[in-house]
Amino acid sequence: MKRVVVPELLDNDLGTREEVEGSLNDLRMFNRRFGGIHTTSEVLRRIAQNHGLKNIFWLDVAGSTGDVASLTGRSLSAHGIGSETVVLDRSSSHMNGSHMSVCGDAMMLPFADNSFDVAGCSLFAHHLEWEEIKTFAREGLRVARHAFFIHDLIRHPLHLALAYAGFPLYRSRITRHDAPASVRRAYTVQEMRDMLQSSGAATVEIETHFLFRMGVIAWKRTTI
């Protein structure tokens, strides 16, 4: 299945206030019920365990309203891991103040080197092209002490079919457009691995999760 870039309506708030809110509610539902929170929390739990962290301080790039950060924090807490999150988004209108929030660009993260334990994103990487992902990964590794991570969709024909089959569940016409568009522009596991192996990471690990999700960890090189 060839990757096709289809602009997504929610990216630019192209809808009424009710349609945008309905689509945000759809995203929350996807993350809670269809593997999003599980994938993000599993990635962060693995990083925390690998480095013996009882508390993890992480940057959620393109984190919007902070819902993923909040739900992931609850999941980590159930495993005895505390978390604190800074949410970065390009638009202040996307933020709701539930976490420390910063407006900024994923390609030029406005933080000093090693500011966080981990930096990464949830359902954002498919919005980027190959060179943008490489740049983003290098920035993520720069501001993180331990690792850069990605939680994203996996492009697959069956996943596209499921995106269309879910139409009766969607609250908003924006979601009916954006859900299949997201699958079409997502990457395969091998494509993601190829991109991140040239990011300067020491190693890249990718695990697949429920309903065509991938959890990616790019481990930072240790310095002497």
Image (cartoon, grey):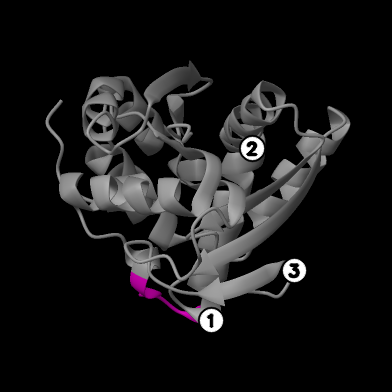
Q: 43 left or right of 45?
A: left
The residue where tag 1 is placed is: 93
Q: Is residue 165 visible?
A: yes
Query: Image quarter for residue 86?
Result: bottom right
Viewer-closest of 132 and 2: 132
**Is 57 drawn above or below residue 155 in the view shown?**
below
Mark earlier in primary sequence (1, 2): 2
**Foreground of the two, 71 or 159:** 71
**Disc 2 target residue:** 37
Residue 132 percent location from the top left of the image: 23, 53
| Residue 5 point in image, percent of width and height | 17, 49
Q: Nearer the viewer, residue 86 or 170?
A: 86
Whether 25 is drawn above or below 153: the answer is below
Residue 118 falls in image quadrant: top right
218 w.r.t. 58: above or below:
above
Residue type, numbered disc 1: Ser
Of all residues, the one furthest to the front in this rendering is 224
Q: Disc number at residue 98? A: 3
Amino acid type at image mark 2: Ile
Numbered range of the magenta stretch: 12-17
| Residue 105 percent location from the top left of the image | 38, 69
User: Which element carries disc 3, helix, strand or loop?
Assistant: loop
The residue at the point 46 percent across, 18 percent down is 208
